[in-house]
Image: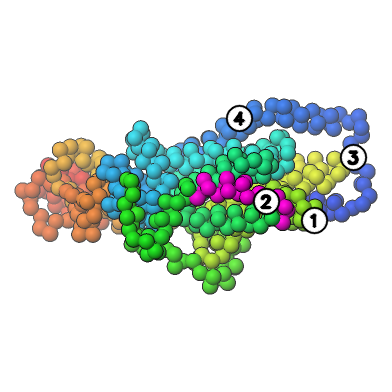
Amino acid sequence: MFYIYYNYITIFIVSAVCVAAVALTLKRKPLGMNFPENSSIREVIRAGGAFIEKHYLIFLGILFMVFLFTRLYMLGLIPAGIMVDEVGVSYDAVCLLKWGTDKNGRAFPVYPTNFGDGNSAMYTYMIWFLLHFLPFSVRNIRIPAVLCSIPCFFASFGIVNRLFRKRTFALLGPIFVTFMPYFMQAQRWGLDCNLMLSWVTVALYFVILALDKDKPLYYALGGVFLGITLWTYVLSYLMLPLFVILLFIYLMFMRRFRFSNFLALLVPMGVIGLPLLMEQLVNMEVIPEFHFLCSDFMKLPDYRLGQLSFGNIGMNLGNIITYTFGGDSITFDCFREFGQVYWCCIPLIVLGFYSSILATIRSFRQKTVDNLVVVNLYGIAVYMVLLIREGYDTHNANGLYIELALIEIAGIRFVIDNVKEEKIRYALLTVIAIVLSITFMVYTHFYFVKQNEVYGFHNTFLSTEPGDIIVYTENIYNPDRNKNIYFTVLYEQTVFQDDVIALWTQMPPEEHATWEEGYMGHIYLHFPDEFDINEDAIYVIGEENRHVAAGLIELGFQADTTFPGYTICYR
């Protein structure tokens, strides 16, 4: 109940600030509340702003330390367990490292098969690279998410600086990237598609920089990072080309289009994305399967092109508002207590959209390029693709949240630019700062202290215990790997237990391929059909079958109860 009442109170406060800001812009007469010319408060505020502007790198560094803490603290333990897609991409990386194929036997694919419908390759290959130097652990397979979040942090500073031309204000970019709920939750674990959020932020920075510099080199850099982003998420195959088309049309209207610049953007984007296009053509049966250099281009068992249809628009129109602001049922995407963006930020987003509409009108009237309009064009491209997808969850819209963060910042900028009475302006900004700071502290306490207590394992997150038990058993009681292990998993841990065990033991893919038959190499996921008391085997027995453990102990087996709920019986 605390969080519900807290949300209501903060939404009311920030809404009042936004309404006051809009109301004050409509007043023609000053309210007579300016600071006197010799006001010490005015001088302190100006001096403070000048100090931050001069030493912005120091403040950026402090923010970066906070950012790293929020991404690295208890990384292997929160969120609890391991998500099923983390298991899939990690096992593919292990197989590529040891045997040169993914778990389905495809040699260095540009779109690994995972559980049949594929996953974006960047996360898999980042784990593959890191496992050359680091041991396998839940923490280490989540490090790629953190590494990709770092350029996102700095790119957000660059974008806001380009949008509003003030380094002091640009610090809001890293601040929002650090404390917005979806950024934090997406950048702490290994869902492959979430990398789009980080890399599209970098790509947007270089696109905006290219528009400001108006030189082919910067357009080429924008194209490079747009191409890199294509490797993070399959929906970006549509989102990013659509964004480029909308940008092309906008620049044509603004009379800023140059063929050489756009060619510089499209060529690196196309070259980097070409292998992904070839993989799609294979799956659409336009071209046959083939092998090129070290990679197999093969059809996926379950191709998801059928999920895209214009017939989905009506259904998704109602979902967009909910999934943008209100959250969904998948708790690893967002907590219902806070949403993807804090509830108190929704009024700022509304104010920011209002500000961006005014900027768009001004841009078309004056025939000048406005970077805020470019950001909105990207958001439109994302929404257009989401509308035609057959249902979506918050992580399907992950690339949207950099635009929402920038729109929130635009809402704050609206207050600064349009509330002329300094005393009122500083009061409104102070209220916003206090509310957001307290909300961030409440959220981080919930994330690091209360989350596991409230949610336990999130939707599709798995216990790592089956893998831990097998590794322990192999190391202690079967170091030569010459004994059969019969393992009955606790009922609540049975889902995908084969993949967890295969990943933890770094099992060859051909051994894992037999799991549907009830065994993987010398590990059996059931009791033997007939117990042979003379077999030198090891039994790992869940408490649902403790009578079997008791019988084996009576026959002379030793018992190890290191793992609660399990008994390891061995000779």
Disc 1 versus disc 4: distance between alpha carbons? 40 Å
* Residue type for callout 2: Phe
Look at the image and name its color scheme: rainbow
Q: Is residue 555 left or right of residue 348?
A: left
Left or right relative to 3: residue 32? right
Q: Is residue 292 visible?
A: yes
- Which element type, helix, strand or loop, lies under badge 3? loop
For the point 10% across and 58% down, the residue is 530
Q: Which residue is mark 1?
A: 365
Location of mark 2 (residue): 257
Mark 2, residues whose alpha carbon is within 10 Å: few (<14), some, or many (≥20)?
some
Label 1 and label 2: CA atoms lie apart by: 17 Å
Determine which residue is flagged by label 3. Answer: 34
Question: For the residue carrying disc 1, how many other residues have a C-alpha within 10 Å: few (<14), some (14-19), or many (20+)?
Answer: few
Q: Which residue is mark 4?
A: 61
Range of the magenta residues?
253-270
Give how far across and how far down residue 58 sits, in percent.
Answer: 64, 27
Q: CA distance from mark 1 to mark 3?
A: 33 Å
Q: Nearer the viewer, mark 2 or mark 3?
A: 2
Check if residue 534 falls in the magenta segment: no
Q: Is residue 268 magenta?
A: yes
| Nearer mark to the viewer, of 1 and 4 | 1
Q: For the C terminus, give its image quadrant.
A: top left
Residue at screen point 47% across, 42% down: 145
What kind of residue is marked 4?
A: Gly
Q: Looking at this view, is 383 or 14 the one in front?
A: 383
Q: Earlier in the sequence, mark 4 or mark 3?
A: 3
Q: Which is more N-terminal, label 4 or label 1? A: 4
* Pair 1/3: label in front: 1
- Identify residue type, mark 3: Asn
Q: Answer whether labels 1 and 3 touch (C-beta < 8 Å).
A: no
Q: Nearer the viewer, residue 24 or 155?
A: 155
